[in-house]
Image (tube, grey):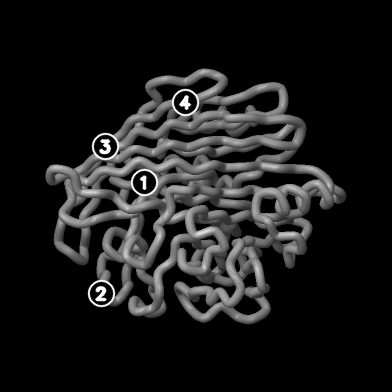
Amino acid sequence: MEELTEVINRYSKSAVLYDENCRVVLCERGARVLGVFLNASPNLLWVNPMLEDAFSKNDWNVGGLRLWISPERNFFYRKPESFEEWFCPEGIDPGEYRIIEADSGRAIFEGRIHADDNLLGARLEAQIRREIRLLESRKGFMRLRIIDALVGEYPARVNPWALAQVPVSEMGAGTALVPVRRGAEPIHYFIEIPRDRLRVSSDHISFKIDGQYVSKLGVKPEDLRDPELGTIAYVSRIGKRMWSVLILRSHDIPLSQEDCLDVPKRDPNLPRAAIQSYNSGPEAFPDIRFGEIELQLAPTMNISGRIVAKVEYDLVAIIGGKSAVLAGIRKFLKTPKPRLY
């Protein structure tokens, strides 16, 4: 943790939420959560191993938990009609944030984002207020609450988009888990995901995270077991006898296809997702490996000609033996027998 904060402070400002059970490292640049440490655990979030190089180049891919804006097609492709020339707009990430308040229990960021919509030929300008609270912790357990508020100028709607980058286990592949109803049909967002990387069970979907094959899973809101609660978890073995699970969950999710604005690259006519997970691969990132668990959040509303949104979601972290982690999955995902890679 000390090494991480030292690097951050050479390029930005840091803040640390803490108690006797956990440390949460925050970075002003990009308003990110960059470190989650429970007791003596390693960082449960992925951080770019070439972090200083990423900071010095103002690169987006530093790691951690971040806030983006979707639909990705509109803002992140220079040729959106054909999904070509992907890039990350610096006006969205890192944007322009500053820490205006921080103590051991919470931190508040305020900032500005902006980007061109290359599909509509429009401009997004918005103010962001981001609050991160340490809600509760005990030995081997922590829960953060993130509250994002957005007010801006834009002629259409956008989804706030929460993305947590997760490390590939040195002990083998990790697993993204999404609780779903029976008969759920996963969306293959980029290309068709091979069968050995995706399992659909009666009450959940398992997706392999190993950093060896670029692919993206989507789950539409109509397939969620609880249509008013979006949940995705990442399960990983982090030691000989130690396991971890990170969980993103929110009641502020899109409730229907109409509210899901992010279309699949594979085919924009496919259904759209409220829950997503990404696996990196050498064809995209030859020197690094990571995965992501993601929430597409409830879209902005138009009020008096301005777009407005306020969303809340939790990041839950659990470490312990395999039985303790499985107990956490049963509690938060209501999945008694998760299929793990």
Mark 2 or mark 1: whose residue is earlier in sequence: 2
Dot 2 and dot 1 residues touching (CB under 8 Å): no
Tell me the crowding category of disc 4: few under 14, some 14 to 19, or many 20 or more residues within 10 angstroms, Cα based: many
Mark 4 to mark 1 CA distance (whole Å): 19 Å
Mark 3 to mark 4 CA distance (whole Å): 17 Å
Return the x and y of residue 335 as percentages of the image width and height.
70, 60
Q: Secondary structure at mark 4?
A: strand
The numbered disc on residue 107 is: 4
Q: Which residue is mark 2?
A: 81
Dot 4 and dot 1 residues touching (CB under 8 Å): no
The numbered disc on residue 332 is: none
51 up-or-down from 173: above or below: above
Q: Which residue is mark 3?
A: 127
Mark 1 to mark 3 CA distance (whole Å): 13 Å
Mark 3 or mark 4: whose residue is earlier in sequence: 4
Dot 1 and dot 3 residues touching (CB under 8 Å): no
Return the x and y of residue 198 as percentages of the image width and height.
63, 74
Question: What amino acid is at disc 4?
Answer: Ala
Return the x and y of residue 262 as percentages of the image width and height.
36, 64
The residue mark sitting in front, 2 or 4, is 4
Q: Residue at x 40, y 43 (%)?
A: 311
Q: Residue at x 56, y 64 (%)?
A: 279
219 up-or-down from 112: above or below: below
